[in-house]
Amino acid sequence: MSSAARRLYKVLVTHPEVPLPALEYLRQKGCQTIVCENVPPVRSDILQKVPGVDAIFWACYQPLNAEILDAAGNQLKAVTTMSSGIDYVDVGEFKRRQMPLGHTPGVVKNGVADLAIGLMIAAGRFFHAGRQEIESSQWKTERIDWLMGQEIRDSTIGFLGFGGIGQAIAKRLQCWDVRQIIYHTRNRKENDGEFAAKHVTFDELLRESDFLVVACPLTPETKGKFNADAFGKMKNNCVFVNVGRGGIVDQEALCQALKCGQIFSAGLDVMTPEPLPAEHPLLKLPNCVIIPHLGTQTIKTTNEMAMVAANNIINALEGQPMVSPAY
């Protein structure tokens, strides 16, 4: 395809903070980029700018659905998100229209895995409670039985979901002297031997995990999976970590489980809603570490996500399979 032909393509970019290398790459490939300037993105602005574009670089968590596709028009050839999870996308509508849809799951695993281990340590060792002790002038020396935490060493580490992120966490734990790694997925992973990991039922996962890490997408099957019944089956020394999606957890049930000591502590990078209101009960619990969805928020990971998304678009416009198709 000639560069002259490529210059006809218009690409809507829904966020002005998309890393510049990705935008420059699109332009080098002959695309005209139309960038929405609002932070956070405003849907009315997106709907105003999307008509007539050939591709959409979706860099926000607003619903990506028939409304957007209809507004774009029949000339639309490709859409990609700049995210791993696509629970905000009406994938069925894309399939119905046979519209190429991309996302960026592979490159997020390392940044999220690092953060997940950080949350395991922070929640297991009472980082938040310790900070509260300092702020309330309760830090006293010469204490032995004070903020006694849980170690990763000699622990059973459980995963709900054992894809790229779960396996990246497990890889990092290989030198941490864990007792065992277990995981629950719909089907056993053929490469689980690489991590000395054992496939178990969901009930076994709940009963055996000393640290339980949620690293799966939000789907109808996983929505609300961690409810009062699930927390009731977990160990009272269990450290619960969620780097998947907030909707996988019944937060009221989690709050109650933390309050009554049904589980030991929690570390959350994702929650419902986002942003979490400042007055939310979870924020007031000493045994709950909460951070504002920072899993992919590193310079390296964000740049890589943007480049995968840009390549998804270029490939689709040139009639090639996307680098990372969503279905």
Image: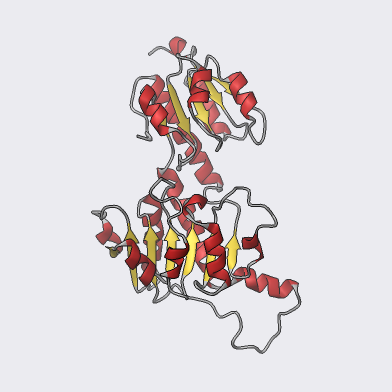
Q: In which quadrant is the C terminus drawn?
A: top left
From the viewer's side, name the closer residue of 327 and 234. 234
Residue at x-position 47% and y-position 64%: 228
Q: Position of residue 195 (x, y in %)?
A: 30, 62
Q: Residue at x 55, y 16 (%)?
A: 51
Residue farthest toward the left in the current orientation of the protein: 190
Residue 107 visible to an observer of this rendering:
yes
Residue 156 pos. (x, y %): 37, 71
Quadrant where the N terminus lies? top left
* Residue at 62% in and 31% down: 16
Give the residue furthest to the front.
229
Image position of 58 (left or right of 197)? right
The outermost residue toward the right is 137
Above or below, 87 relative to 156: above
In the rendered image, is residue 122 in sight? no
Q: Is residue 60 left or right of residue 279?
A: left
